[in-house]
Amino acid sequence: MSRDSARKAAQRAIPAERCEVCGTTEGKIERHHPDYSQPLNVKILCTTCHAAEERHTGQRKSKAMRECPVCGAHFLYRHSGQRTCARTACLKEIGRRNAEKRWHAHDRTKHCQVCGTTFLPKRQRERSCGKPECLFVLRSTAVRSRRRTDASDLQPWVTP
């Protein structure tokens, strides 16, 4: 008997309502044939238990387990880019770590453009240490650079 006819015979004869291993009724419930020559000898399993059973018997290729870098739990990955066990807390922690990497891609300490002191910026684009005199100088130079120059400020191009 072929695999397809064994599956069809089992579908007609045996109802699949509850997983024999974990007892779940949710999700897809499947029939596992240990031997296709005996079509009515089946185990009723959920998708997860069915995959585990086939990995255990060697009918399904087994992936290597990965270790979650956050919680240390071992998990089977679904795709090659999956690096964590996908628990909410682990995903949040990985997101926080990636944000830290972006923020700390270079040294966070900066030097004030006005007085030269080292400071820790509160925002990424800060250019001064925050002292009132440094802020005043930066604002006044920004306003000056935005003004249009008049003809008296222009130097004629001189070639030697």
Image (spheres, rainbow, N blue to C red):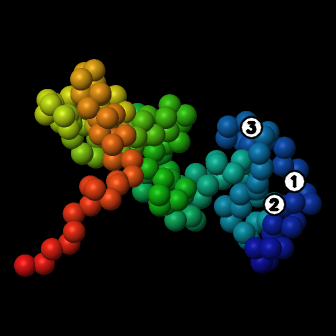
Asked if residue 48 lies left or right of residue 110, the reply is right
Relative to 17, residue 71 above or below: above
Secondary structure of the residue carrying numbered label 3: loop
Residue at 22% x, 63% y is: 155
Judging by the rendered image, the residue that carries numbered circle 3 is 24
Q: Position of residue 128 (x, y in %)?
A: 26, 32
47 and 106: which one is in front? 106
Asked if residue 54 lies left or right of residue 121, the reply is right
The C terminus, quarter of image: bottom left
Residue at 49% x, 35% y is: 92
Judging by the rendered image, the residue that carries numbered circle 1 is 14
Q: How many marks?
A: 3
Relative to 156, residue 42 above or below: above
110 and 137: which one is in front? 137
Q: Identify which amino acid the numbered label 2 is placed on.
A: Leu
Q: Identify which amino acid the numbered label 3 is placed on.
A: Thr
Residue at 24% x, 28% y is: 134
Q: Can the viewer see residue 73?
A: no
Spot the residue most to the front: 152
Secondary structure of the residue carrying numbered label 2: loop
Residue 40 tag number: 2
Q: Identify which amino acid the numbered label 1 is placed on.
A: Ile
Q: Nearer the viewer, mark 3 or mark 1?
A: 3
Near mark 2 (Cα within 10 A), the count class, few <14, some 14-19 or many ≥20, is: some
Q: CA distance from mark 2 to mark 3?
A: 22 Å
Near mark 1 (Cα within 10 A), the count class, few <14, some 14-19 or many ≥20, is: some
1 and 78: which one is in front? 78
Q: Position of residue 80 (x, y in %)?
A: 47, 61
The part of the image, by quadrant, that contains residue 54 is bottom right
Q: Position of residue 74 (x, y in %)?
A: 43, 43
